[in-house]
Each structure stands twice: as structure tokens, then as C-alpha cells.
Image (cartoon, rainbow, N blue to C red):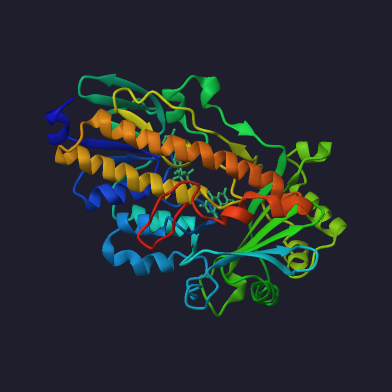
Amino acid sequence: MGSATQDHLLVLIIGAGPAGCAIAQGLKKNGISFKIFDKAKAAFRNRHWAFTVGWSRPFLLELLPEEWADRLTKCQVDPFIDCEKTGNDEIVIYNGATKEGEFTFPIPGAKEINMKKLRMMCAESIDVQYDKRLTHLEYDEDGAIVHFQDGTSVRGTVVVGVDGANSQMRRCLLPEAAATPDLLPFALMNFVASYTAEQALFIKAGIHPLVDIAIHPSGHYIRLNVLDMPDLDKPESWTFQILSTWPIKNVEDYDNDADRLKRLKAHVERDGWAEPYKTAIECIPEDTEILKDQLKIWKPSPWDNHGGRATLAGDAAHTMTFHRGQGANNAFRDAFVFVQAMKQVRSGECRLKEAVDAYDKDVVERGMKEVQISKSQTFFTHDWERFTTSPVMTMGTRPCTDVETADGASGK
Ligand SMILES: Cc1cc2nc3c(=O)[nH]c(=O)nc-3n(C[C@H](O)[C@H](O)[C@H](O)COP(=O)(O)OP(=O)(O)OC[C@H]3O[C@@H](n4cnc5c(N)ncnc54)[C@H](O)[C@@H]3O)c2cc1C
């Protein structure tokens, strides 16, 4: 695969989540051919959440069309604020029992991004082929052939699997046992709630403008933020994201399907949370759906990239917990490095194998470190007494390796 690759470079992207869309946008911006597929039926999906984009923001902006910097602001959960201007581009960890801000970590230029808005914005100018679930891969002289559940297949020069934590692509590159994520022993609830106008105003006024993170000394974590504000003047139209974790200590928490809202409310009432957490949990409407969730991690082990014809990015390449807020940041870093690699192949600066080997090395080394650090952060997050010895106290939310960025954020 020499100059033929260079002349006919076609990238196949499996997964149109935030990282897959970022890769597609970056390839489009650089005039590199690609096709992008997703198993979902459409760009719109009910299940979504928010993530804090910090050190990876310059990488993401580099991949998106230049004129989109403003549009990224509109993908914020609260599009009406600019936390950088108000000096609120920081994470504050509150004591859940008192609402006192205990620890503060600055994140210059941070934005709390609504994942659905970002995905819909990115998908609008690229031709995502939906209802295409990857099943398996084959390889030939010219590259790789991806096969979908509907019986169709497509040939490309290189395939990048950006298909999330339960990646099928990962299972194509590694034996099943090595590709399977590990479960951590924590209850996890991640869902969307709506309130009356009065309750919504009260909760919004009481939370940090970027994202509100609280740890109760009993060992319970709650992250609370507005998820969408379709109409500033109609607080009853706002939705809130509630993300909660605690160590599994009894059989009810293992039995993860039934009475999930009842259990969350009982935990909060038992431990005595300060406002606005108390109201935010107490007033969740009883018919609110809380789907079963589990805290999963996958620490990358080097995969066979078949001579540079197949690789992974985003959560597929490193599945980490969110207690240090690094998953999306690393996913956008992967997307940036992958697009750089493809530019080198297209220009003839590198052969495909060389470029993808170098990309894989960066992703695997960074991913291995961060999955481990984030896992450790998860355990410390639920141990109030020892929180001060946790990774965020020394590293904040900076990257775990040196990834000097345009705005000077560094992992050093
Ligand atoms: C509650 C929560 C809070 C978080 N907070 C933060 C934060 O503050 N900061 C941060 O940096 N990160 C955070 N993260 C992590 C972040 O959300 C993820 O790292 C990010 O969404 C990963 O994007 P992705 O595109 O790699 O994967 P995904 O978003 O999982 O997208 C994968 C896509 O692949 C598609 N797909 C799956 N299987 C197939 C298949 N077989 N064939 C075709 N398509 C397929 C799916 O439909 C999906 O569209 C958080 C995560 C959670 C759950």
C-alpha cells in the first residue's frame, strides 16, 4: 500500500458520536474522502448528556469549520452564558451536606456541551449513513471491508472504529476477553428531569453556572446541570441532567432495574443533602425514566491494526469513568491526531502503516494512563476523607500526558 493508498485514500468511520463526527468534520475540512456509518436510525436520539470540554477545545475547533466557533457556544447546555467572560470557567467541588465550595479547579475557556446538540450540528453537513450496524471486518490488498448487519458491505483504505464503550470494532481487533470492558462496583444513575417553573428557577439559581459537582461525606456523588434551555423565559421547558454514583453496598443496588428513582430519593433523604440538591432530587417527577446503567471501563491494550488498515478512537479506544471529566477531551484529541495522520498519508509524508502505528501509540499510551487515573479518581470521589489525595488535587482536569495545545493547556 504505497502511492495507491495516497491517491485513493478513503476513510471509513464507524460511529457518528461526538468523536466520529469530529473526525468526519476534520477529514472534510482537509478534503480527504470518507464515509461515516452509525447503527442508530437517525441523528436524533433521546439518550444524551452533557460533558465539559476543557483542554481539548482547541483540537475540536481545529477540526470544525472555522465559522463554527460561535455555533459551538450554542451547543452549550446554557447557551445564554459565557463562563469564560464571567470567570466561572472552573470546576468547583461542593460538600453535598453543606453546599460549601471545598475545591476549585480552573479550566480556561471550558464549555459544558450538550452532546445531542453537538452531534446534530456536526451531522447536519456530513452524510451519515444510519441504520448501519458493524458486524465484522475483512482485509484485502487495497484495505479493509466493513460488513453491516443488514448484509451490505463497503470497502475503504482504513477503518476507524469510533463506536463507543461497547465497541464492536474493538472486538474485531482483539480477542473477546481482551475487548470486554470491566465493571466497577458503583451504582450509576444518569438521566434527565424536568420541573415546574418555580422549581427550575430555584435549582438553576443554586447551581454553579458551568456544571455543579457535589460529594456528600457519606460517599455519594451528584453532578447537576441544566441540560437544555429551549426558551429562556419558560423555565418549565428547561431540562436538567442528574448524574449520581455511590458505592454498591447492598443487594438492592446490585439489583439495578427496579425502583431506581425511589432508591436515589431514599439515599438522598437518608444522608441529608443541602439545597439545591435536596429539592432537585425530591421534586423529580415520579414518572421520570432512569434507565439501567453500569460504570464500565476499558483500559486499552495494543490492538492489531492490520498494517494500518484498522484502528480505534474515542470511548472505543479507551473507556473511562467521568469523575475527572476526561473521556470526551481524549476523544477529541484522538480525532485531531487521527486527522493529522491521514493528512500525512495523503501528502505522501508517511505510509499508512507508519502513520497509523504512530497514531495508535499515542492513543494507547494516553488511554492506558487516563483510564487508570480516572478509575482511581472514581474511588477517591466516594471517599471524602481521602479526596485530598486524589488525582484531581494534583492534576486538576489537565491531560495526563503532554499535549501542548494552541491555548497553552498542557499535561506537564
Ligand atoms: C454521564 C457522563 C458524563 C460525562 N462527562 C464528561 C465530561 O465532563 N468530560 C469529558 O471529557 N467526558 C465526559 N464523558 C465521556 C464522554 O461522554 C465520552 O467520552 C464521549 O461521548 C465519547 O464519544 P464517542 O464518540 O467516542 O462515543 P459515543 O458517544 O458512545 O458514540 C458512539 C457512536 O457509535 C455508534 N455505534 C455503536 N456501535 C455501533 C456499531 N456496531 N455499528 C455502527 N455504529 C455503532 C453509536 O450509535 C454512537 O452514535 C461523560 C460520559 C458520561 C456517560
Q: Does residue 379 lie above or below 82 as drawn?
A: above
Q: Does residue 93 lie above or below 309 as drawn?
A: below
Of 235 and 184, nearer the camera is 184
List x then y, in percent, for residue 47: 54, 50
Q: Is residue 70 visible?
A: yes
Question: Which residue in the rendered view is the most extreme toward the front?
Answer: 412
Residue at 72 percent across and 53 percent down: it is 387
List x then y, in percent, for residue 306: 32, 22
Of 401 and 192, nearer the camera is 401
Question: Which residue in the rendered view is the most extreme toward the right?
Answer: 270
List x then y, in percent, for residue 66: 27, 63
Of 84 and 112, nearer the camera is 84
In this rendering, would 58 be left or right of 247? left
Image mark count: 0
In this rendering, would 375 be left or right of 102? left
Q: Is residue 162 visible?
A: no
List x then y, in percent, for residue 175: 49, 19
Residue at 27 percent across and 34 percent down: it is 355
Of 312 and 144, nearer the camera is 312
Q: Quadrant of the N terminus?
A: top left
Residue at 45 percent across and 52 percent down: it is 44
Q: Quadrant location of residue 293?
A: top right
Q: Does residue 280 lie above or below 330 as drawn?
A: below
Residue at 39 percent across and 44 percent down: it is 334
